Amino acid sequence: MPLVHVSWALVDNGLRPACDAFFREVFGAETAHEILITPETEKMGLDREESLLMIGDTMLIPIAPAGRGAQDGHPLGDMLRRSAAANRWIGVALKVTDLAQADAWFAERGFKRHYDPGMEAYYFLVPRGQALGMRLEIVTQDMPGDPRRDPGWRPAMDHPLGIEGLQAIGLSAPSLAEARAVFAEKLRWPELGTRDLPDARCAAFAMGDTVLEALEGPEGSAIADHARDVKGICHLVFKVRDAAATAQYLEGKGLPLIGDRADRFAIAPEAAHGRTIWFTDVTPPNYPKVGSRLGALIAAA
């Protein structure tokens, strides 16, 4: 089940242009597709706006309520407003070739699935409460404009940030034992190892073509607070060619950095639209080579 995208919510659509511009300017993100309110889509009941942003071969989607979704009481709009907070993410989408088979696989493992009306042939959701706060979207359709559908497409590698690919997605957990119960035992994602980070103990799991880092922090730490109050995804990690050059590039843009440049560092979340996104040129033991495998799955299908 390769990764299709990672998404998060914005409380108001007026914030979306600046958020998108930040990722285009700083990360070199390219827009694969935009879903916008137009007279035609408004008549169809469109309830959000979003840009499908490609950073290397990873798709990120900041989503904002719009159209009918801007009205209080609208289900999707209310969900987005509830989900819009610093370092709170919606979840991930994972690709399968047979949705019915995937549904049976999740059902056998005790997961409840949600189908949006009219979309039963395209995807189902595993609500965030069943995966320690990370919503799973299991999809069989291609994302509109996704360049990974083209066998000849390759991500641009000449941006000064030097991103080689997504190394990991981090998730705060009440304990590593609970993380193992969900991700290793129920979802059967192989555990790659454990290690200590400055603010947490990390257990890594192979999640499709990327890594899920489950983090257990000591009482009173930011990770422990996130696991208690926010839940779910807390960060992304991008592998870069040269960490020193990446740090120099970011500081040249006036962006404050946190963390350890010799290991991994991030733009301070308050300067990155509430996202913690780490950069590193170090590959932890047993981690796979970075790079989306989505194109290979699409080609095989």
Image (cartoon, rainbow, N blue to C red):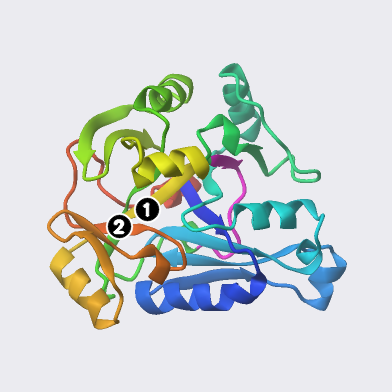
Q: Nearer the viewer, residue 205 or 274?
A: 274
Q: Secondary structure at mark 1?
A: strand
Q: Is residue 249 above or below residue 288?
A: below
Q: Amino acid at mark 2?
A: Trp
Q: Residue furthest front?
A: 220
Answer with left or right where residue 261 lies relative to residue 8: left
**x 87%, y 69%: residue:** 43
Residue 93: x and y in percent read 54, 46
Is the Cβ of the residue at disc 1 closer than 8 Å to that at disc 2? yes
Q: Secondary structure at mark 2?
A: strand
Q: Which mark is residue 290?
A: none
Tell me which segment is drawn in magenta: 135-146
Density class for disc 1 (Cα within 10 Å; few <14, some 14-19, many ≥20) is many
Density class for disc 2 (Cα within 10 Å; few <14, some 14-19, many ≥20) is many
Asked if one can make out residue 8 in the rendered structure from this viewpoint, the answer is yes
**x 66%, y 71%: residue:** 13
Q: Is residue 275 above or below residue 115?
A: below
Q: Amino acid at mark 1?
A: Leu
Answer with left or right where residue 60 lies relative to residue 176: right
Q: Is residue 187 above or below residue 278?
A: above
Separation of residues labelled 1 and 2 (CA atoms): 6 Å
- Residue 15, by quadrant, is bottom right
Q: Residue furthest right?
A: 43
Q: Nearer the viewer, residue 34 or 223?
A: 223
**Residue 142 is one of the magenta-drawn residues:** yes
In the picture of the structure, the residue carrying the numbered disc 2 is 278
**Residue 60 is one of the magenta-drawn residues:** no
Residue 36: x and y in percent read 69, 72
Q: Which mark is residue 236?
A: 1
